[in-house]
Image (cartoon, rainbow, N blue to C red):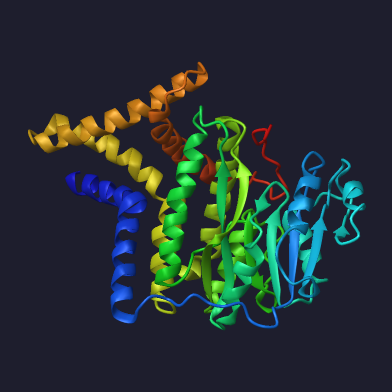
């Protein structure tokens, strides 16, 4: 029982803190041995690039997205802008028709984002493809900053940074912003060590020649598309100077729905990428994949529960004060999360409780996502999350 307890505690610690600490040490060691990775320069002439914007019923903000897109700094002769609006039943396609600089592809049938992406990719001939969502705004230099990395032939994909705009940090969704700051730090270190493990759909790019269609029922299409490129031996670079900004979830319920869907997609991805668990072809990539993704999406939430239950039993069955101290710490943390939940439902604002509450919501979402995946009732069809108003 003691062995299981310490094993559970170690896995939980390694998943959320230990991996980051070890990653930091390895990055520092790499810099000492081989030096810092050079900052690439955009090739001349600039590589041809297609910016693909996925939009589903976004009439309220589509024109803001268009203005943002047209203001991006990239050589116009090398840039192609394409919006895909499949399934949209509002005025999104009609509003886009006002802009001759933009190619709009629309199908009234709603078959999911990945089907729309496959359809679009069949028409693209440019060297690079950058994917982004309609509900995000890119910084002006995003495309140049991304494209410069492709001067390195070992780079197959580049992931931008997701930033969460928070005009109002008065509820538990503020934890989303904190989470993404931590995630961004891990991705930066992953990239410096070797490769990022997956990309987020808010902003990522690939070499067109390396694109491989994924099954139509894929939930995390962005993650799968990028990881299939990593499987071929190419690196995925993280570029924080290219960023996509979006509003936080409208409320914790919306964030929970989104996290459950991501968790279901996570376990689906782990199953489909199970060959990557074999460390022999690419040991460093496997280490990063397991440490940063697999543990979070599979066993760690179960070990959290096991550590808590075993800790209670050990307090009653042993005289070791260490177990009492650890249990007190766990009770304090989960008590803070529960208090955060209660205060959230009563609209009482205590920022100190946002992080433990959001942390517990995230791990509950993993358990719920695994259950949903096992039941087979998670659809891959486009799901639009409610976001806070920018007004």
Is 63 displayed left or right of 325 in the figure? right
Quadrant location of residue 304? top left
Residue 144 shows in this picture = yes
Is 176 displayed left or right of 22 in the figure? right
Find residue 173 and report its horizontal and vertical position in percent: 52, 34
The residue lying at 58 percent from left, 30 percent from top is 251
Find residue 307 and report its horizontal and vertical position in percent: 28, 40
Quadrant where the N terminus lies? top left
**Residue 130 higher or lower than 262, as above or below:** below
Q: How many marks?
A: 0
Residue 314 shows in this picture = no
The residue lying at 10 percent from left, 34 percent from top is 321
Quadrant where the C terminus lies? top right
The residue lying at 34 percent from left, 30 percent from top is 334
Find residue 54 and report its horizontal and vertical position in percent: 75, 54
* Residue at the outermost left position: 319
Is 79 displayed left or right of 281 in the figure? right
Q: Looking at the image, which is closer to me, 207 or 75?
A: 75
**Residue 246 higher or lower than 349, as above or below:** below
Q: Looking at the image, which is closer to me, 103 or 221?
A: 103
The residue lying at 70 percent from left, 46 percent from top is 135
**Residue 82 higher or lower than 281, as above or below:** above
**Residue 341 higher or lower than 261, as above or below:** above
Find residue 56 and report its horizontal and vertical position in percent: 78, 47
Quadrant location of residue 50? bottom right
Q: Looking at the image, which is closer to me, 213 or 63?
A: 63
């Amino acid at each position: 029982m003691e062995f299981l307890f310490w094993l559970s505690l170690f896995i939980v610690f390694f998943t959320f803190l230990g991996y980051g600490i070890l990653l930091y040490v390895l990055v520092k060691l790499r810099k000492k041995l081989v030096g810092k990775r050079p900052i690439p320069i955009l090739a001349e002439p600039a590589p041809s690039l297609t910016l693909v914007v996925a939009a589903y019923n976004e009439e309220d903000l589509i024109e803001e997205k268009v203005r943002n897109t047209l203001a991006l700094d990239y050589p116009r002769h090398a840039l192609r802008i394409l919006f895909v609006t499949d399934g949209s039943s509002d005025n999104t396609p009609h509003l886009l028709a006002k802009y001759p600089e933009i190619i709009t592809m629309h199908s009234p049938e709603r078959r999911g984002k990945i089907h729309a992406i496959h359809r679009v990719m069949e028409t693209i001939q440019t060297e690079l493809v950058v994917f982004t969502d309609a509900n995000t705004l890119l910084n002006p230099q995003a495309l140049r900053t991304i494209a410069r990395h492709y001067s390195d032939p070992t780079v197959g994909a580049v992931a931008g940074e997701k930033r969460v705009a928070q005009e109002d940090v008065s509820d538990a969704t503020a934890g989303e912003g904190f989470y993404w700051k931590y995630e961004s730090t891990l991705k930066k270190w992953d990239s410096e060590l070797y490769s990022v493990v997956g990309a987020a759909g808010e902003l990522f790019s690939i070499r067109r020649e390396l694109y491989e269609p994924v099954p139509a029922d894929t939930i995390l299409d962005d993650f799968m598309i990028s990881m299939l490129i990593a499987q071929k031996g190419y690196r995925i670079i993280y570029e924080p100077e290219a960023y996509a900004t979006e509003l936080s979830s409208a409320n914790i319920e919306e964030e929970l729905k989104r996290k459950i869907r991501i968790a279901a997609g996570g376990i689906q991805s782990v199953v489909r990428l199970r060959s990557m668990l074999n460390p022999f072809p690419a040991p460093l990539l496997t280490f990063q994949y397991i440490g940063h993704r697999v543990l979070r999406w599979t066993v760690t939430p179960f070990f959290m529960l096991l550590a808590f239950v075993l800790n209670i039993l050990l307090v009653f069955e042993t005289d070791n004060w260490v177990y009492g101290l650890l249990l007190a710490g766990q009770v304090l943390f989960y008590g803070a999360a529960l208090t955060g939940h209660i205060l959230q439902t009563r609209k009482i604002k205590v920022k100190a409780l946002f992080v433990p509450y959001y942390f517990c919501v995230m791990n509950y979402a993993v358990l719920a996502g695994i259950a949903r995946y096992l039941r087979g009732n998670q659809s891959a069809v486009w799901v639009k999350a409610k976001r806070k108003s920018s007004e």
